[in-house]
Image (cartoon, rainbow, N blue to C red):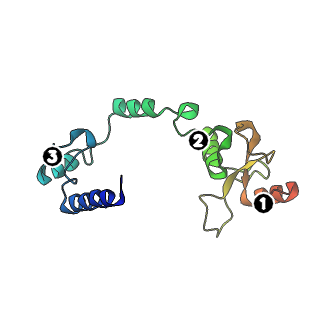
């Protein structure tokens, strides 16, 4: 295809998009079938605010898979944040420190929500739930200092 033909096609596509000819099409499989602006608005508002049923949520979950069967599962190639999220999902949010036994953050500390953290024992960051322990910020910092943590 020569440059002149490519330019003609490009200009024709630009005109079609700017005129809104493609805007009404639902998908490529329904070429030529359009919905009016009113009916498109109704379709969006029709389901707004209606929670999904338990059956519907289950079907969505089965379609995407979960855990190792999930379509976006990375296995051992998971990143730092993803691994911490996985541990929190498996073991829950830490509520106390395994080293010092603290159950409440010190008074006057603004960030109480994340005062207790998951610390990786081996510092190899593997997907092994037994390789993690709950620590408060103070113990976590001293633990990683002793271990000479690279993170």
SS for callout 3: loop
Q: Mark 2 points at which residue?
A: 89
Residue at the spot 35% in from the left edge and 29% down from the top edge: 55
Quadrant of the rendered image containing residue 140: bottom right
Q: Which is closer to the viewer, label 3 or label 2?
A: 3
Q: Which residue is more in the foreground, 109 or 151?
A: 151
Q: Can residue 38 be seen in this view?
A: yes
Figure disc tally: 3
Q: Looking at the picture, how far across and down is residue 141, in whole percent?
A: 78, 60
Q: Which of marks 3 and 1 is nearer the N terminus?
A: 3
What residue is disc 3 on?
A: 34
Mark 3 vs mark 1, CA separation in Å: 60 Å
Q: From mark 1 to mark 2, how far is it between C-alphas?
A: 23 Å
Look at 52% across and 35% down and name the residue there. 70
Question: Please, is residue 86 above or below residue 135 in the view?
Answer: above
- Mark 3 vs mark 1: give the one in front: 3
Q: In this view, does 55 lie to the left or right of 124?
A: left
CB contact under 8 Å: marks 3 and 1: no
Characterize the local packing of mark 1: few (<14), some (14-19) or many (20 or more) Cα atoms within 10 angstroms.
some
- Residue beneath the point at 67% across and 51% down: 80
Between the residue at mark 3 and the residue at mark 2, the CA separation in whole angstroms equals: 44 Å
At mark 1, the secondary structure is: helix
* Residue 53 spot, x, y in % from top left: 32, 34
* Within-10-Å neighbours for mark 2: few <14, some 14–19, many 20+: few
Which residue in the rendered view is the most extreme toward the bottom? 108
Q: Is mark 2 on a helix, strand or loop?
A: helix
Instruction: Determine which residue is flagged by label 1.
Output: 141
């Amino acid at each position: 295809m020569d440059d002149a033909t490519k330019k003609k096609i490009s200009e024709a596509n630009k005109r079609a998009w700017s005129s809104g000819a493609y805007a009404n099409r639902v998908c490529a499989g329904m070429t030529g079938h359009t919905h009016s602006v009113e009916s498109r608005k109704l379709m969006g508002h029709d389901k707004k605010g209606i929670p999904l049923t338990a059956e519907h949520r289950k079907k969505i979950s089965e379609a995407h898979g979960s855990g190792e069967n999930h379509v976006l599962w990375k296995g051992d190639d998971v990143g730092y944040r993803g691994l911490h999220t996985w541990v929190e999902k498996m073991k829950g949010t830490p509520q106390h420190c395994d080293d010092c036994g603290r159950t409440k953050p010190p008074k006057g500390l603004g960030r109480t929500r994340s005062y207790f953290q998951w610390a990786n024992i081996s510092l190899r960051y593997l997907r092994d739930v037994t390789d993690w322990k709950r620590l408060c910020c103070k113990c976590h910092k001293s633990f990683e200092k002793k271990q000479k943590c690279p993170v």
